[in-house]
Amino acid sequence: MVSFGPDNERFNPLVHPPEGFSGTAIYIAIRKGHVMVHDESGELPTVDPDVPHRSRHFLGLIDDTAVWGLDIGDDHNPTDDWRFVHLRQLYGGIPEHHWVLAGRAEQIATFERTHQFCGQCGSPTESHHRDRARVCPSCRHMAFPRLTPAVIMRVTRGEEILLAHGAQFPGRFFSTLAGFVEPGESLEHAVAREVREEVGIEIGTPRYFGSQPWPFPHSLMIGFTAEYESGEIAIQEEEIVEAGWFTADAMPPSPKGGMSIAGWMIEDWLGQQGVVD
Ligand SMILES: [Zn+2]
């Protein structure tokens, strides 16, 4: 299973640079979900790109390297040496821990941009002096970066896996079921409810698999595995085009490994079924 491993664990999130800091840096310049990289090397800038930006955010340190995020104005065009690549297409093009940080930079930039005014009284907000938050000077209301928890589940029945072709997928493509957690709901309840709603199946107790930050736009994907208990597939037509039980030797087009937890869960299951690359 792929995981965002040791390189990511070296990252120390901070809101301000340590006093007197003078180490190296990388700059994640974001323009509408696209990240600025060097045209030839494909790498992130290591000197301040000195481009017009709406806001600048210190994200933290990787060892002694500072990580900065810049929110670039929509109409800024890079000079010849640089290009903007969408965060999704950037996966595999830069070190994985840089890609994860680019997702973090994108989410923080979006948070800052969309929380300039208090949601309670409408006054202009200010950055909190210590935390990653916006605070209202009038009513003291605080806003934190928005995170939306979503459950994603690998449901199996003996040697079969349940996969669905979601209405939003491009082409004929199958993946695990997923859905957002509702207020007042536990993760386990959300897993059982989503499976019931989307395909009409009842499952046994969900088991935690792993999680993944998913910055499209601000989800936290929480993965579970569960075994089939009862029911016949009956799809919720607004969300699901087709769903079925598949064996490892007859898989439809589906993610495997790569950048999403769905791919990790399917790859992990294929490994259990004795399918090795
Ligand atoms: Zn307020």
Image: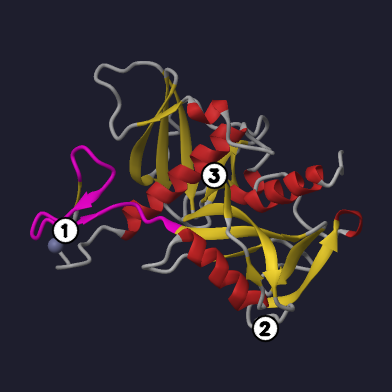
Q: Specify whether residue 147 is painted magenta.
A: yes
Q: Image height check: is 195 above or below 36?
A: below
Compared to residue 42, the image places residue 161 above or below, namely below
Stretch of the chain drawn in magenta: 128-148
Q: Quadrant of residue 56?
A: top left
Disc 2 designates what residue? 237
Would residue 229 be visible to someone looking at this image? yes
For the point 70% across and 65% down, which residue is it?
228
How far is the residue under mark 3 from the one under mark 1? 32 Å
Is residue 152 left or right of 115 when viewed as pictured? right
Residue drawn at (83%, 60%), measured in percent from left and top? 253
Give x and y (percent) for residue 31.
Answer: 48, 50
Q: Quadrant of residue 235?
A: bottom right
Disc 3 residue type (three-letter): Val
Residue 35: which disc? Answer: 3
Q: Identify residue for label 1.
A: 141
Q: Nearer the viewer, residue 137 or 184?
A: 184
Mark 1 Cβ inside 8 Å of ligand 1: yes
In space, the residues marked 1 and 2 are separated at their CA atoms by 41 Å
In the displayed structure image, the side of residue 10 where residue 81 appears, left or right: right
| Amino acid, disc 1 | His
> Sequence-wise, which precedes: disc 2 or disc 3?
3
Q: Position of residue 259 (x, y in %)?
A: 66, 46
Give SS at disc 2: loop
